[in-house]
Image (cartoon, rainbow, N blue to C red):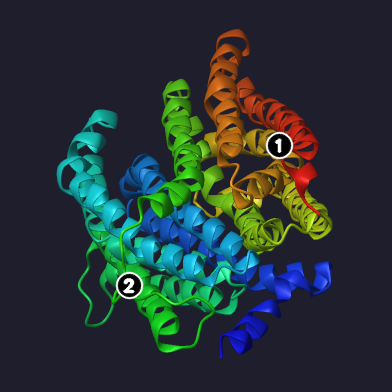
Amino acid sequence: MSENITDIHSENKMGTMPMTRLILTMSVPTIFSMTVQALYNVVDSVFIGQYDLDGLTALSLAFPLQMLLIAFSVGTAVGVNSLVSRKLGEKNYDEANSAATHGYLTCIFSFLIFLLLGLFLSHPFMNAYSNNAKIVEYGTQYLTIVLCFSVFSIVQINTEKTLQATGNMIVPMFSQLIGAVVNIIFDPLLIFGVGIFPEMGVAGAAIATVFGQFCAMVFCLIAMFGLKQEVKVSLRKFKLNLSTLKNIYSVGLPSIIMQSIGSVMIIGLNAILAKSAAAVTVLGIYYKLQSFVFMPCFGLNQGVMPIIGYNYGAKNKRRMYSALKHGIVIAVFIMAIGTVLMWTIPDVLISMFGGTEEIMSIGESAFRIISLCFIPAAAGILFTTLFQATGKGIRSLIMSFCRQLVLILPIAYVLSLLFGLSAVWYAFPFAELFSLALAVIFFINLTKTDFKKLG
């Protein structure tokens, strides 16, 4: 019986399927679903902007805490994904199951943190960044709802990453699609009050978001526990293993910190641009729109990560390098499309948010300059994927720390002093190029040490 199970596991496509077809099979569903996710993030802001511009400002100011929630959820789940895929590659199915089960334990830790933040930090956070009582009220409503009900998002993301570690990309795709569609449908109904639904404004947008996450979570859990999966989550014989948690967070914690740094970076950039409300608005619009470019790349990242982790665990260096190379080529192609769009139609993109003439003027120039970072970012994202998938998450952390704190904020600040706010945008490509150079150095070092031991 055990031999038959082993034979079934040994046929995992991540170790056998031709690489281009494998990456497309693993990534296209996630790229599609994350593009839809980017769409509903933008739609959310567009609806709020139409309802009340103060609400749009409130969402922009609340964005860093939302990023923090995503950082904890995705970062921890990346640690679970990396460990599960490596154990599957090693054919160690008991430890793969244990890692998947421990993943749900980490969900409890993360939720308790954000429940407390939602209850006690929402109002002080908004109050610290605005003197406008209306903006503070809107932001407090939104953050309280989203953070206090964050358990839906946290569990959904953990389940998605666990399934992706086994090569199952279809369930995560439909999960994100369900969440996005539900959010898009209920946003206008609850924001403006349509039919039987009351007009709830910004609070309605938050409720639509949470309800979408709840529906996505339910779908994921039904797939995980109701259908046959390569990993099994069970609490019946569960024993807390501190070593397993350590292995999860050895990759997950650097990923959490790496993504949390983005929240700090936005707060810092907002402070640098504070002299111009229009420039702050442009930055907020950029981060909404750039998700259309970066989300597909992160979808590719999610497809490539378990492939690299599986083949690293199987000690198949050739396939591991092949996954990296093919991933970089596809990522550069995606980012090149984004660069072209930012250069050719920035006015069309900005106008969706009803920008003023000043916002349009600042935004067109800013979008063209910032987009110069897209192509080097493509390669950087895939190197980050390699480091995380092979348990070398600290390197990803160093890259992100240098790019988003050590470099971009000081460069942006100096440029603002020397050449004015219009020069701040050049900090993005400068920081990204340095980060890529650092990634190449890390990679070369690993090829001469850890990777050299692989077959």
**Image quarter hosting the C terminus:** bottom right
Q: Which element carries disc 2, helix, strand or loop?
A: helix
Task: Count numbered badges in the picture.
Answer: 2
Q: Quadrant of residue 102?
A: bottom left
Residue at image position (65%, 53%) is: 293
Q: Which element carries disc 1, helix, strand or loop?
A: helix
Frontmost residue, 173 versus 239: 239
Label of residue 214 in the image: 2
The residue type indicated by label 1 comes to Cys
Residue at image position (71%, 80%) is: 11
- Give the side of residue 432 with respect to residue 93, left or right: right
In the image, residue 64 above or below residue 293: above
| Residue 138 showing in the rendered view | no
Coordinates of residue 440 in the picture (x, y in percent)? 77, 34
Residue at image position (58%, 24%) is: 408
Compute the Cα span from label 2 to label 1.
Answer: 35 Å
Circle 2 or circle 1, nearest the eye: 2
Coordinates of residue 452 in the picture (x, y in percent)? 79, 43
In the image, residue 230 above or below residue 421: below
Frontmost residue, 256 versus 176: 256
Residue at image position (60%, 29%) is: 403
The residue beneath circle 1 is: 373
The residue type indicated by label 2 comes to Phe
In the image, residue 230 above or below residue 251: below
Of label 2 and label 1, which has the lower sequence position? 2
